[in-house]
Image (cartoon, rainbow, N blue to C red):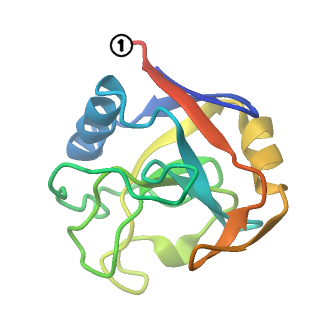
């Protein structure tokens, strides 16, 4: 079990090790390294997703390890409450950033429009916290859109397994 501790409350996450072993180990390693501490959910789009894990409150990107292989072809779908790896337009470009789906986002699935976004876990407790984060006011800051006006901070990510 993973606990994402935020300044809005805790989010418990179950990882899909059998379906996305590379993504799960990648996430755990970033958590164990303390990478997520004091990062923010820097992109919040109601009725879509909340994204974080790579930037601090100043919207500066934290250094990452090399990108991982995209596991979007694992049979899992981008359903409400699932976690997926964020990436650029390059298929195998995911590093530390992840997002939590606020609704079923079928168009993000493998084969929908491109290779897709790898689902690697789901919220098991704290979906109310996710929804509270989704409701914060956002705006444009530092060349980024959909940024919370008051920082939504990841205080820590605890690996309990």
- Point out the image quarter for the C terminus: top left
Q: Residue at x 41, y 62 (%)?
A: 86
Q: Residue 103, image x and y in percent? A: 69, 61
Q: Residue at x 45, y 53 (%)?
A: 98
Any part of residue 100 in sight = no
Q: Is residue 131 left or right of residue 57?
A: right
Q: Residue at x 26, y 31 (%)?
A: 29
Corner quadrant of residue 136: bottom right
Any part of residue 12 in sight = yes
Residue extending farthest bottom: 113
Q: Is residue 157 left or right of residue 102?
A: left
Q: Residue at x 52, y 52 (%)?
A: 52
Asked whether 147 or 74 is in front, the reply is: 147
Q: Residues within 10 Å of mark 1 (few under 14, many from 20)?
A: few
Asked whether 124 or 67 is in front, the reply is: 67
Q: Is residue 21 left or right of residue 136?
A: left
Q: Is 17 above or below relative to 108?
A: above
Corner quadrant of residue 26: top left
Helix, strand or loop for disc 1: loop
Q: Residue 102, image x and y in percent? A: 69, 57
Q: Is residue 126 left or right of residue 1?
A: right
Query: How many numbered discs, if any?
Result: 1
Corner quadrant of residue 22: top left
Q: Residue 133, image x and y in percent? A: 76, 48
Residue extending farthest top: 160
Determine which residue is flagged by label 1. Answer: 161
Q: Is 5 above or below relative to 104?
A: above
Asked whether 29 or 150 is in front, the reply is: 150
Q: Is 116 above or below relative to 101?
A: below
């Amino acid at each position: 079990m993973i606990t994402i501790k935020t300044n809005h409350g805790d989010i418990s996450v179950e990882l899909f090790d059998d379906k996305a072993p590379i993504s799960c180990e990648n996430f755990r390693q970033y958590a164990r390294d303390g990478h997520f501490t004091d990062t923010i959910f820097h992109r919040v789009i109601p009725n879509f997703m909340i994204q974080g894990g790579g930037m601090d409150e100043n919207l500066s990107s934290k250094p990452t390890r090399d990108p991982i292989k995209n596991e979007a072809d694992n049979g899992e779908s981008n359903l409400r409450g699932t976690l997926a790896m964020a990436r650029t337009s390059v298929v195998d470009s995911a590093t530390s950033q992840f997002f939590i789906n606020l609704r079923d986002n079928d168009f993000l699935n493998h084969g929908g429009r491109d290779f897709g976004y790898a689902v690697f876990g789901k919220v098991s407790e704290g979906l109310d916290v996710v929804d509270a984060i989704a409701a914060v006011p956002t705006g444009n800051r530092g060349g980024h859109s959909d940024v919370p006006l008051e920082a939504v901070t990841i205080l820590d990510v605890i690996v309990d397994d």
